[in-house]
Amino acid sequence: MSFTGAFWRSGDAGFSDAALATIFNGRRPARRPAAVLRAADAVDVAAGVKLAAAEGWKVSVRSGGHSWAAWSLREDALLIDLVSLNGMHYDAGTGIAAVGPAARSGLDLDPFLAAHGRFFSVGHHPTVSMGGFLLQGGMGLSCRGVGWAVESVESMDVVTASGELVRCSETENADLFWAARGSGPGFFGVVTEFRLRTRPRHRSLIRSTYVYPAEVATEVLTWFHSVRRDVDPSVGLLAVGAAPPGSGSPVVIIDGVSFDGGPSALAPLETCPVAGRAVKSAAAQPTTLSALFAEQSAGSPAGLRYFVDNAYLAGQTSDLVPALVAAFTDLPTPQSSVILSDFSPQLSRVLPDMAVSLRPDLYFAAYVAGRGPADDEKCRSWLLSAMNRLSPYSDGCYLGDSDFTVRSDRILSDAAWSRLQRIRAVRDPEGRFPGYLGTPAQ
């Protein structure tokens, strides 16, 4: 079978580089596919799925390589790399942007939309590609106020397990459309194009940041847990635990970014009872998405050996804060960080009918990283201990920061999980798409 794109079998020259191309995490698993197809277009993708069936291979998919667990590396599989499917087109009449799955959040899509005066809630890191991001729900910029990014997907083109290219929307192949919006690497198809409902671009972006020493972490996190409900939904709000370069000392950072809410939307962040202990503060300062992307890229560079986990948290302040403080103030390496993000404005919303079905109130994620294999055991054990402390308060997790080979948690509601399995049985009866590495706790 011939392809317009490039194709390698195991053992071919260039196979190893093709298998590992664009993988963000410097800690790579030993798993390797049987072959790699760098598809040039949807026709290549469909031909690849049919070849996999003929060869008896599974099919795995990569759009950007940001998966911490390297979901795309599967044994005895054809890895379909979508890196060339990165086209973008905007229709001014409808406000719809047609986007390839390999279009990158901050390097491709956001600047493209900015030129048209439009916005879409892309991933926080500039090199996150839209394919995996949207399939996992899309915990994107401004989602505290506007919801999951995948809620704004109008339709998509999907190559099915039988190798057929179909259009999916609420009215066409609605079962696949439902499943694609939240099943992530468990999806049983290959999305070759998304059509996104964009919105007018924000007129102003204002940020407030407060940096507190670790000694007042309990007071700051206790205050954060209550004040977050007073902060306008236009604000992306989180607490960060990190050790800034050059200091070596852990700090707790309170960060708020207002999309068109103005300085008043950030005013509640000035009410921390230990505000006088802040070692640095900058209230209601203008910023840009390019500046935020650059900061994220510098703080989470490719090639470090990352261990990552997360949980949606629910519980009383008196229970949660003691479990969180150690994670914020006793990080194992200077490259590690944790975040606590507020999603409380979303609790009152009615979600569209889609696989995304859990309703986070608080989101905790730990990004534990070392520079070499010598750091691995320290990072692994620290992360396990941190998640064990928080597990009594976990209400599920986000696929984008999960590795079920290490720790399992639920990713969908029980009803949504059962529905996903029923659709899978119909759409992929031979199990061409292997599903998740490890098993979610459903």
Image: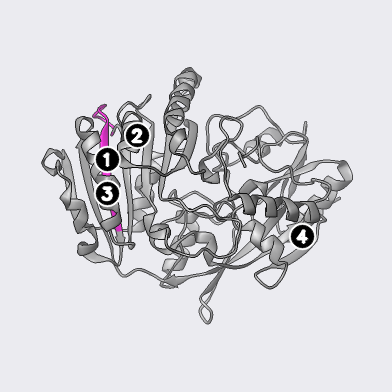
> Circles 1 and 4: CB distance less than 8 Å?
no
The residue wearing badge 1 is: 221
What's the residue at 59%, 64% (across, down)? 353
Q: Amino acid at mark 2?
A: Leu
Q: CA distance from mark 4 to mark 2?
A: 49 Å
Residue segment shown in magenta? 244-257
Instruction: Indicate the secondary structure of the residue bearing disc 3.
Output: helix
Residues packed near mark 4 inside 10 Å, few (<14), some (14 to 19) or many (20 plus): some
> Circles 3 and 1: CB distance less than 8 Å?
no
Q: CA distance from mark 1 to mark 2?
A: 8 Å
What's the residue at 58%, 51% (across, down)? 413
Q: Amino acid at mark 4?
A: Val
Q: Nearer the viewer, mark 1 or mark 4?
A: 1
Rendering colour mode:
one colour
Percent of width and height locating residue 58: 78, 42
> Circles 4 and 2: CB distance less than 8 Å?
no
Which mark is first along the chain, 1 or 3? Answer: 1
Instruction: Indicate the secondary structure of the residue bearing disc 1.
Output: helix
Residue 261, quarter of picture? bottom left
- Front-most of 365 and 315? 315
Q: CA distance from mark 3 to mark 1?
A: 9 Å
Q: Amino acid at mark 3?
A: Ser
Which mark is first along the chain, 4 or 3? Answer: 4
Instruction: Indicate the secondary structure of the residue bearing disc 2.
Output: helix
Which mark is first along the chain, 2 or 1? Answer: 1
Q: CA distance from mark 1 to mark 4?
A: 52 Å
Residue 254, quarter of picture? top left
Instruction: Indicate the secondary structure of the residue bearing disc 4.
Output: helix
The residue wearing badge 2 is: 324
Which mark is first along the chain, 2 or 4? Answer: 4
